[in-house]
Image: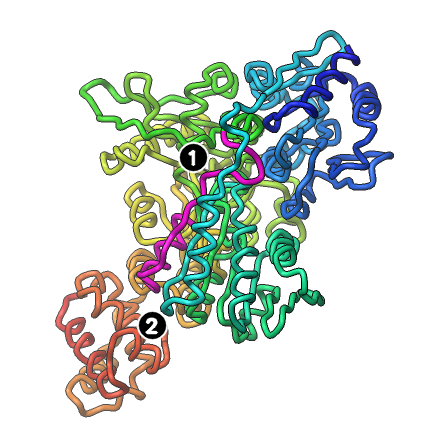
Amino acid sequence: MRSQLQQWINLRHNTPCHRQLLVISGEQEWSKQIVKSHFAKLDNLATLWVGQSDRHNNQIHIKDYRSKLGHEYDYVILDAFDGFRTNAAMALSGTIKSAGLMVILCPKLKDWPNYRDPEHHNRISYGYSHIDCFSYFYQYLGKKFVDDVSVAIFTAEQFIAPVSKLKTDSTEKSYTQQNLAVSAIYKVAKGRNNRPLVITADRGRGKSSALGIAAAQLMQDSNINIIITAPHIATTEQVFHHTKRLLPEHILEKNKLSYKNSQLCFVPLDKLILDPNTADILLIDEAAAIPVETLIRMTEKYTRIVFSTTIHGYEGSGRGFEIRFKKKLAELKPEFRTVHLEEPIRWHKNDALEQFWFNSLCYQQTPAVKIELSNHPILCKELTKQQLVTSPADFTAICSLLINAHYQTSPDDIQRLLDAPESKCFVITQNDNILGVAQVNEEGGQRLSDLAFDISSGKRRLKGHLIAQNIASHYNQAAFSELAQWRISRIAIKPDIQGHGLGSQLLSYVEQQAKEHHIVMLTTAFGCSSSLLNFWHQNRYEMIKLSNKVEVSSGENNCMCVSYLAALPNNMLKLIQTEFYQEVVFQVDKAWQTISATLLADILARTSNEKELPSFQINMIEQFCNGTRHYTSIIRIARQFILSRAIQLKTLTVNERNLIIAAVVQNKQYKQIAIEFNLTGKKQIELAIKNVLKLLLSMKN
């Protein structure tokens, strides 16, 4: 058997091949000995060992995989005995060079689902035992190993040894798309201002190399100051590598490469925001891993900017970039351009390793199949983990829905869907076609009862139980965490059939099932927007918390909502509602000053409990409107008046509503209001405020 493995390795070395996956399945020490005896020269090659090794210099713990994403390797050896993370496996596969190998060491495939994975505790919530947990994901992944004709599997009993040879017409790599990207970057620097470029690609398409090549060309052709930034300096390694390669006479200092009178300089994100640098062009690598608000701020400050990023397949953040940021970019710089790279550079087209991970984790882009609703009945049901594993078509449909609908869905989430004991999956179907999915997590209840006080007092923060802990701590309500609750972590309906009430129908079914399980409440959390808030409100969910900080991946404040299925103890509901409204009133001109006025109007209409002002204060507002009283003397009263008329704000025009909220409720500066509403100054602003107050005074409360 071992001689066959060596022959296979030699054949791959002597034959033009795609990258492949080799699975060594058996006892842990035996597996390591196989690697040691058959990959003896690994230390002489670019090799990364993921896991514990007493013989390899270049090794990392699997949790540190992000630190290696800017590197390239001939071999990546992933020791699953030391813990397996799907995010890491998929991301690190993208660091392997053409003709390289990913080697996974794991237990016997039939035993792997029962193996006590050291990383399993990171995938389950507090209070759920992982000792006896059966891993449906490893059952699923093991079957994928066996079913894929490109995966080599070596065991003590047999060796399945396919060789994914390159076709004769596939040996030459195409650089056409990369050259177009280089030209587009060059044009951003030399063309008209305010025409940003967005470069998107999967890993291995040469987008970072394109940045480096373009930087070298610009530095050769003129005196130019190029700034590059990224989440980590290691991310830019390939950019600097290609710039150095093309400029042999360069001078390299810390974070800076100089050539004659030009320079390419790395500046960390925080420094770039606090102290904007003078740059002829700003390059941003792995932009999807940067908060949307940060990207927006840089877009506003720099007139020549290139965004380069991986769009999907690794962290889930790429969807946030596509869904959230590009929409905002179109508003700020409508003449921005896009370049998408499909041709692989680091490996060859139809690469076996990439296709394995994309197919296994449902990231393979497939043509959209249009679904038309018929007269056949629409049904809802729960799918167990066993049913998901034994119904590959359903599992693929569900994962694809979640990935395309939610910017935060990552490969690790696919693993949790099958392995987290607190996770449930509900679907809505017609003719056995899955139309939508809701992923639900059990939270709170007796599992937290012993630590309820520590949670509410801020002494403890446990794994999972997101809303149960957050609300209990925020409002100092220990009993809240002890209430049995289900959190809807994801809900997605096929895009072409949205707007037919299917999401609401699925939520009604989840509510019915929750009641049968004696669940006290349903909860959810999401990046708050008017459209999403309206959807949840229509389904009887009310907001109970809004974060003070913008959420990193969405660029929006995170919102928590709840639907009560039973009465809460000790007036807890009224207390939470009152406290939340007080928080709204306090934060509108502070942490929430930048929230859109439209969204704030929605929030106020649903939370305000202000009483009508006494007649003497109403008279003071009328005096301002009649011109006998200065605005400065009624600002506080005007604010209370607007809060008391929050429901009436919806009857105003969008411009009227947004102006009165921005000026009076959010207390924005006159200069900012003038720019936002195209007004000349104080006189016009106060006249506009006066006109809106007159309208509100004429309405019945």
Q: Position of residue 646 (x, y in %)?
A: 26, 64
Residue sitting nearer the eye, 110 or 162: 162
The answer to whether residue 329 is magenta is yes
User: Which residue reaches farthest right?
Assistant: 54
Please give the name of the residue rendered at 31% of the width and 56% of the height, measured from the top-left corner.
606
Q: Secondary structure at mark 2?
A: helix
Please give the name of the residue rendered at 82% of the width and 34% of the height, measured from the top-left corner.
53
Residue 250's place in the image compared with 515, above or below, is below
Residue type, numbered disc 2? Val
Q: Position of residue 78 (x, y in %)?
A: 71, 31
Q: Quadrant of residue 134?
A: top right
Which badge, 1 or 2, is on the more N-terminal residue?
Answer: 1
- Residue beneath disc 1: 402
The answer to whether residue 141 is magenta is no
Is residue 458 visible to the viewer in this orientation of the structure? no
Q: Which mark is residue 146?
A: none
- Residue beneath disc 2: 665
Is residue 334 visible to the viewer in this orientation of the structure? yes
Q: Is residue 134 left or right of residue 519?
A: right
Q: Position of residue 64 (x, y in %)?
A: 69, 44
Residue 393's place in the image compared with 693, above or below, is above
Quadrant location of the C terminus in the rendered image: bottom left
Q: Position of residue 15 (x, y in %)?
A: 65, 23
Residue sitting nearer the eye, 214 or 133: 214
Please give the name of the residue rendered at 49% of the width and 43% of the height, measured from the top-left corner.
175
Magenta-tinted stretch = 321-349
Q: Residues within 10 Å of mark 1 (few under 14, many from 20)?
A: many
User: Which residue reaches farthest top?
Assistant: 157
Q: Secondary structure at mark 1?
A: helix
Q: Quadrant of residue 83?
A: top right
